[in-house]
Image: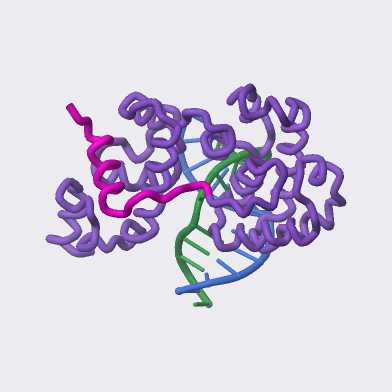
Chain colours: A purple, B green, C blue
Amino acid sequence: MENEIQQICGRLLKHYGKQGWWPVRRSFEPEWFEVCIGAVLTQNTSWQNVEKALDGLVRENIITPSDIVKADSEKLKKAIKPSGFYNQKAERLKILSGLILDSGIDSFQQKIARERLLSAKGIGKETADSILLYACDRPFFVIDAYTRRIFSRIGIVEEKSEYEDIRTLFENSLEKNVDLYKEYHALIVGHAKQVCRKEPLCEKCCLLEICNYGKKQISNPP
DNA sequence: GGCCAGGCACAGC
DNA sequence: GCTGTGCATGGC
């Protein structure tokens, strides 16, 4: 028997197809390090601007954890400037890179503990879970503002639920599978960007039949 | 020109 | 514990 979360994610997959996240340009070493950097740079920032910042790092030949740790702070800030919040993001990148080096580049993916990531300044729950899922290939479902918005509108979660409560709900509802988690999170973000903004275009929404919020908006426009 | 973007830390109640 | 605010750029 399919639960509601499986049903919704299945619908998104059918409607949009596979997303293939996380996009990487293979310019960083190791390759998964780019995901770690991207996870920090994308904090409250559009992916478009993150790409410019990644380009900046490659241009300056800052492509490994030790490159970041050793990099001159001003040079680092300048490289990532287009992603905004560059003062704090430069510091966060240095802290995260130091953590990766401390835990050992070769063992980071397998062994880094979620708690250890969370204890690093600048790494919150969403950033930690993005790193764990997309860089480390470990089964942690990423909960972001989009997930909250979509699923609270449908009525599956409370809008102000605890992050961990929502994550547990998703992880308990879905088959424990890294590729599945990656696809579904990507689909949720992609869907939200297209049709589930603050001014929702609900008539285009592939979840309309099962979304009470959408039905309400259609019959009762804002 | 205002609002938003794949958050987080910290101060002040 | 909860709420507000700073962080900053670029696109629409």
Question: For the view shown, which residue lies furthest in the left direction?
Answer: A219
Relative depth, front residue between A14 and A155: A14
Relative depth, front residue between B4 and A111: A111
Q: Is residue A20 magenta?
A: yes
Relative depth, front residue between A208 and A59: A59
Q: Residue at x 20, y 30 (%)?
A: A2
Image: A83 above or below A68: below
Name the quadrant containing residue A215.
bottom left
Image: A15 above or below A59: above
Question: Residue A121, image x and y in percent?
Answer: 69, 35
Name the quadrant containing residue A31.
top right
Question: Residue A132, image x and y in percent?
Answer: 56, 32
Quadrant (top left, top right, bottom left, bottom right) of the N terminus of chain A: top left
Q: Is residue A60 left or right of residue A47?
A: right
Relative depth, front residue between A110 and A42: A110
Q: Residue at x 56, y 56 (%)?
A: A45
Question: Residue B10, image x and y in percent?
Answer: 68, 38
Name the quadrant containing residue A112.
top right
| Number of numbered discs overlaid on the protein picture | 0
Q: Is residue A73 left or right of residue C2?
A: right
Q: Residue at x 35, y 61 (%)?
A: A194
Q: Is residue A148 left or right of residue A55?
A: left
Image: A174 above or below A150: above
Q: Is residue A11 magenta?
A: yes
Question: Residue A63, image x and y in percent?
Answer: 75, 49
Q: Residue at x 80, y 59 (%)?
A: A60
The magenta stretch is: A1-22
Question: For the view shown, which residue lies furthest in the front direction?
Answer: A26
Quadrant (top left, top right, bottom left, bottom right) of the C terminus of chain A: bottom left
